[in-house]
Image (tube, helix red, strand yellow):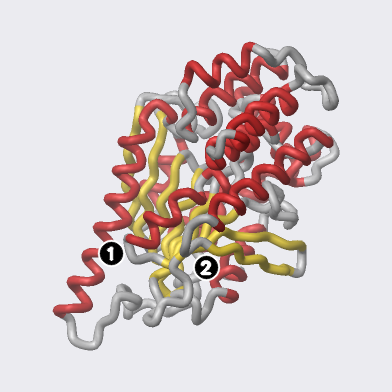
Amino acid sequence: MDHLEELKEFARLHAGGQGMKPDHAAGVLARIDNDTSGDPASWAAVWTAEGKVAAARGDLLDACRHYALARFPYHADDDRVLAQRLCVDTFDRWRKGRQGIERVEFKHPDGTFSCWAAGLDAPRPRPLLVVMGGIVSVKEQWAPLLPLLSKLGFAAVVTELPGVGENTLPYAPDSWRMLPFLMDRLQGRAAVDDTAMLALSFSGHLALRTAARDRRVRQVLTVGAPVSEFFADPTWWPRVPGITADTLRRLTGAATTDELRALLPRFALTPQELHAVRVPVRYVASSRDEIIPAGEQALLRRFAEDARFKVFDDVHGSPAHLGAMRRWLFSALLRRRLALRVRAATGPGRSAGSARPDRPTRGGVPS
């Protein structure tokens, strides 16, 4: 499959994941015949033009969907940089017309990143929910969930994997440190000692590594997260789609594919790390996943303390089962919240933020 056809194949999945009608996505893709920056029939130009049409009719979220696809899979050329900026600015316009969504920016020693957030600074700090996408999805794709997450009682922040969207941090084996940094900065604005991670695909890998080291993470919910085999199994690599490999090379700064393959084993989670993940892990897997090996499930089943799975007959991200996938993940999230409330109401000295008082707030494997 050549570059443009592979782009189109993945775009169909991501368009559906954002709620775009298949007929509309197919019509847009049919008008794209190249991926050359500056060409009006190019990938970024056609998707951006469609986004501007949606913005002109006042449908700002639909415009964001198109801009997110215009900058897909990452914003390296001028047209994609423009699409990335339009995506952020247009979502900012949308959220200013509503109450309760704010923009939060952070300066990290290795770069900067930003979040869209809701439910911070409640009179009684709310449990924190961190939402992150994978290596090709920007926070604006998930941020429309914020009003719902706030209504459910969370202080919710939606952010991006290092190297993706507005996140200028490098994607590296120690990128998990971004998440404790985020929790530190939100101390007082949310109940960070009771943090759940809804971390999709490659960000699920970051969440698992963080959960092994930082006991403030109390639950990990993920979809198609790499664990170890994706990074370390040389027999799997030839199956990895070109877009995935190219995007990882861009995010890590690897100069060549060989350099990337030499780096990736350092990302692999060890049995020691997985054994240190002592919180509930809820993992959606796809039986025909073309990116993540099926063996990742076996590793979690063997070493993680409480891992449960929902498997769909689908490709990576289970795009044909979005409704069922979301219901399963949100049910797991809310069941834990309900259990904590019952425990807090019936158990003396307990609070919703202290579900596991026998364990330290921080610790785990050496960092």
The type of residue carrying mark 1 is Arg
Crowd band around label 1 with a 10 angstrom C-alpha radius: few (<14), some (14–19), many (20+): some
Residue 89 point in image, percent of width and height: 67, 49
Q: Indicate whether 240 appears above or below 134.
A: above
* Residue at which label 1 appears: 337
> Left or right: where does residue 166 sit relative to residue 121?
right
The label on residue 213 is: 2
- The residue shown at (60%, 23%) is 239
Q: Nearer the viewer, residue 210 or 189?
A: 189
Q: Secondary structure at mark 1?
A: helix
Q: Earlier in the sequence, mark 2 or mark 1?
A: 2
Question: Observer-nearest residue: 278 or 312?
Answer: 312
Quarter of the rendering occupied by the N terminus = top right
Asked which quadrant contains residue 196, the reply is bottom left
Q: Is residue 22 above or below residue 344?
A: above
- Expressed as whole percent of the image width and height from the top left, the position of residue 362 reads 49, 76
At numbered mark 2, what does the secondary structure look like: helix, strand or loop? loop
Q: Quadrant of the C terminus?
A: bottom right
| Left or right, 210 with reference to 342 | right
- Looking at numbered disc 2 in the image, what kind of residue is underneath it? Arg
- Residue 234 visible at all: no
